[in-house]
Amino acid sequence: MKTINELLGLKKQESQELIIELNSLLANYQLFYQNLRGFHWNVKGEKFFELHLKFEELYNDAVVKIDEIAERILTLGGTPMHAFADYLEAANIQTAKKVTDGNTCMELTLENMATLVKFEKAMLPLAQEAEDEGTLTLLTDYISQQEKTIWMLHSWLTK
Protein backbone atom coordinates (compact mmCIF):
# COMPACT_ATOMS: atom_id res chain seq x y z
CA MET A 1 0.00 0.00 0.00
CA LYS A 2 1.18 3.53 -0.75
CA THR A 3 2.06 5.92 2.06
CA ILE A 4 -0.20 8.89 2.80
CA ASN A 5 2.44 11.20 1.28
CA GLU A 6 2.44 9.19 -1.95
CA LEU A 7 -1.36 9.23 -2.09
CA LEU A 8 -1.39 13.00 -1.59
CA GLY A 9 1.52 13.60 -3.96
CA LEU A 10 3.62 15.23 -1.23
CA LYS A 11 7.36 15.06 -0.74
CA LYS A 12 8.16 12.88 2.29
CA GLN A 13 11.17 14.84 3.62
CA GLU A 14 9.47 18.23 3.34
CA SER A 15 6.32 16.79 4.90
CA GLN A 16 8.37 15.57 7.87
CA GLU A 17 9.80 19.08 8.31
CA LEU A 18 6.30 20.55 8.10
CA ILE A 19 5.07 18.11 10.76
CA ILE A 20 7.74 19.42 13.15
CA GLU A 21 6.76 23.03 12.44
CA LEU A 22 3.04 22.29 12.65
CA ASN A 23 3.56 20.64 16.04
CA SER A 24 5.32 23.80 17.23
CA LEU A 25 2.40 25.85 15.91
CA LEU A 26 0.02 23.48 17.71
CA ALA A 27 1.93 24.00 20.97
CA ASN A 28 1.72 27.78 20.58
CA TYR A 29 -1.99 27.61 19.87
CA GLN A 30 -2.55 25.49 22.98
CA LEU A 31 -0.85 28.13 25.16
CA PHE A 32 -2.72 30.91 23.36
CA TYR A 33 -6.00 29.06 23.99
CA GLN A 34 -5.24 28.48 27.65
CA ASN A 35 -4.28 32.11 28.17
CA LEU A 36 -7.57 33.19 26.58
CA ARG A 37 -9.51 30.86 28.88
CA GLY A 38 -7.75 32.35 31.88
CA PHE A 39 -8.49 35.89 30.69
CA HIS A 40 -12.14 34.97 30.08
CA TRP A 41 -12.49 33.57 33.59
CA ASN A 42 -10.45 36.12 35.52
CA VAL A 43 -10.80 39.52 33.84
CA LYS A 44 -12.17 42.19 36.16
CA GLY A 45 -13.19 45.81 35.87
CA GLU A 46 -15.61 48.08 34.09
CA LYS A 47 -15.13 46.36 30.71
CA PHE A 48 -15.75 42.88 32.13
CA PHE A 49 -18.80 42.05 30.02
CA GLU A 50 -17.24 43.23 26.76
CA LEU A 51 -13.95 41.42 27.37
CA HIS A 52 -15.52 38.27 28.81
CA LEU A 53 -17.40 37.84 25.51
CA LYS A 54 -14.40 38.75 23.33
CA PHE A 55 -12.12 36.22 25.04
CA GLU A 56 -14.80 33.54 24.63
CA GLU A 57 -15.04 34.36 20.91
CA LEU A 58 -11.27 34.16 20.55
CA TYR A 59 -10.83 30.90 22.47
CA ASN A 60 -13.66 29.27 20.51
CA ASP A 61 -11.84 30.21 17.31
CA ALA A 62 -8.53 28.94 18.72
CA VAL A 63 -9.96 25.54 19.63
CA VAL A 64 -11.16 25.06 16.04
CA LYS A 65 -7.69 25.94 14.76
CA ILE A 66 -6.06 23.55 17.25
CA ASP A 67 -8.14 20.72 15.86
CA GLU A 68 -7.41 21.70 12.25
CA ILE A 69 -3.66 21.86 12.89
CA ALA A 70 -3.67 18.46 14.63
CA GLU A 71 -5.64 16.95 11.75
CA ARG A 72 -3.24 18.48 9.22
CA ILE A 73 -0.35 16.84 11.07
CA LEU A 74 -2.18 13.51 10.85
CA THR A 75 -2.92 14.10 7.15
CA LEU A 76 0.82 14.53 6.54
CA GLY A 77 1.49 11.22 8.29
CA GLY A 78 2.63 12.63 11.62
CA THR A 79 1.47 12.47 15.21
CA PRO A 80 0.25 15.67 16.87
CA MET A 81 1.64 16.57 20.26
CA HIS A 82 -0.93 15.91 22.92
CA ALA A 83 0.79 16.34 26.30
CA PHE A 84 0.73 19.75 27.93
CA ALA A 85 4.33 19.30 29.10
CA ASP A 86 5.34 19.00 25.43
CA TYR A 87 3.38 22.15 24.58
CA LEU A 88 5.13 24.10 27.33
CA GLU A 89 8.52 22.94 26.08
CA ALA A 90 7.84 23.67 22.39
CA ALA A 91 5.87 26.93 22.57
CA ASN A 92 7.21 30.47 22.29
CA ILE A 93 4.04 31.84 23.88
CA GLN A 94 4.34 31.99 27.65
CA THR A 95 1.70 31.11 30.21
CA ALA A 96 -0.08 34.19 31.54
CA LYS A 97 -0.71 33.78 35.27
CA LYS A 98 -2.87 35.85 37.61
CA VAL A 99 -3.73 38.47 34.98
CA THR A 100 -7.03 40.22 35.71
CA ASP A 101 -6.62 43.73 34.28
CA GLY A 102 -8.52 44.05 30.99
CA ASN A 103 -5.89 46.14 29.21
CA THR A 104 -3.11 43.76 30.22
CA CYS A 105 -5.19 40.79 29.03
CA MET A 106 -5.73 42.51 25.68
CA GLU A 107 -2.06 43.48 25.34
CA LEU A 108 -1.00 39.88 25.99
CA THR A 109 -3.62 38.59 23.55
CA LEU A 110 -2.31 41.00 20.91
CA GLU A 111 1.30 39.92 21.52
CA ASN A 112 0.36 36.22 21.46
CA MET A 113 -1.58 36.57 18.23
CA ALA A 114 1.32 38.48 16.63
CA THR A 115 3.59 35.58 17.66
CA LEU A 116 1.26 33.14 15.93
CA VAL A 117 1.18 35.19 12.73
CA LYS A 118 4.98 35.50 12.62
CA PHE A 119 5.29 31.75 13.12
CA GLU A 120 2.72 31.02 10.41
CA LYS A 121 4.40 33.38 7.94
CA ALA A 122 7.77 31.74 8.62
CA MET A 123 6.25 28.36 7.69
CA LEU A 124 4.99 29.51 4.28
CA PRO A 125 8.27 28.94 2.36
CA LEU A 126 8.55 25.39 3.68
CA ALA A 127 4.95 24.60 2.67
CA GLN A 128 5.61 26.13 -0.77
CA GLU A 129 8.78 24.08 -1.19
CA ALA A 130 6.86 20.94 -0.25
CA GLU A 131 4.16 21.87 -2.79
CA ASP A 132 1.70 21.36 0.06
CA GLU A 133 -1.34 23.39 -0.95
CA GLY A 134 -3.36 22.11 2.00
CA THR A 135 -0.95 23.52 4.56
CA LEU A 136 -0.46 26.72 2.54
CA THR A 137 -4.21 27.32 2.45
CA LEU A 138 -4.54 26.61 6.16
CA LEU A 139 -1.75 29.06 7.01
CA THR A 140 -2.82 31.84 4.63
CA ASP A 141 -6.42 31.64 5.85
CA TYR A 142 -5.23 31.95 9.44
CA ILE A 143 -2.88 34.83 8.61
CA SER A 144 -5.49 36.94 6.80
CA GLN A 145 -8.04 36.44 9.59
CA GLN A 146 -5.52 37.12 12.36
CA GLU A 147 -4.09 40.23 10.73
CA LYS A 148 -7.58 41.76 10.82
CA THR A 149 -8.01 40.70 14.46
CA ILE A 150 -4.62 42.19 15.33
CA TRP A 151 -5.70 45.48 13.76
CA MET A 152 -8.91 45.40 15.83
CA LEU A 153 -7.15 44.55 19.09
CA HIS A 154 -4.56 47.24 18.42
CA SER A 155 -7.33 49.77 17.73
CA TRP A 156 -9.10 48.80 20.95
CA LEU A 157 -5.88 49.41 22.91
CA THR A 158 -5.03 52.70 21.16
CA LYS A 159 -6.10 55.77 23.06
Image (cartoon, helix red, strand yellow):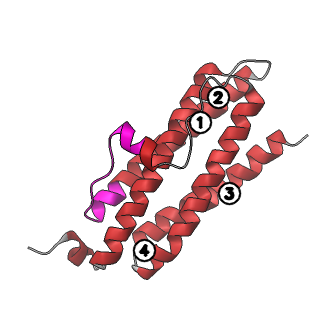
- Residue 104, quarter of the rendered image: top right
Image x and y of residue 92, in percent: 54, 49
- Locate residue 63 relative to residue 112 in the image: left or right: left
Nearest to the eye among marks 1 and 3: give it. Answer: 3
Q: Which residue is mark 4?
A: 133
Labels 1 and 2 touching (C-beta < 8 A): yes
Q: The N terminus appears in which quarter of the rendering? A: bottom left
- Locate residue 32 relative to residue 144 in the image: left or right: left
Labels 1 and 4 touching (C-beta < 8 A): no
Residue in the image at 71% along x and 51% along y:
150
Mark number, residue 53: 2
Indicate yes or no whether the magenta region holds residue 76: yes
Residue range in magenta is 71-87
Q: The C terminus appears in which quarter of the rendering? A: top right
- Locate residue 48 relative to residue 116 in the image: left or right: right
Q: Which residue is mark 1?
A: 57
Image x and y of residue 59, in percent: 54, 37
Q: Which residue is mark 3?
A: 147
Tell me the amino acid under the disc marked 4. Answer: Glu
User: Callout 3: helix, strand or loop?
Assistant: helix
Tell me which label, 1 or 4, sits earlier in the chain.
1
Mark number, residue 115: none
Residue in the image at 56% along x and 45% along y:
93
- Residue 96, quarter of the rendered image: top right
User: Callout 1: helix, strand or loop?
Assistant: helix
Labels 3 and 4 touching (C-beta < 8 A): no
Image x and y of residue 110, in percent: 69, 45
Residue in the image at 67% along x and 22% along y:
43
Residue in the image at 39% along x and 47% along y:
67
Image x and y of residue 123, in percent: 50, 68
Instruction: Measure the alpha-carbon separation of dots 4 and 2.
Output: 34 Å
Tell me the amino acid under the disc marked 2. Answer: Leu
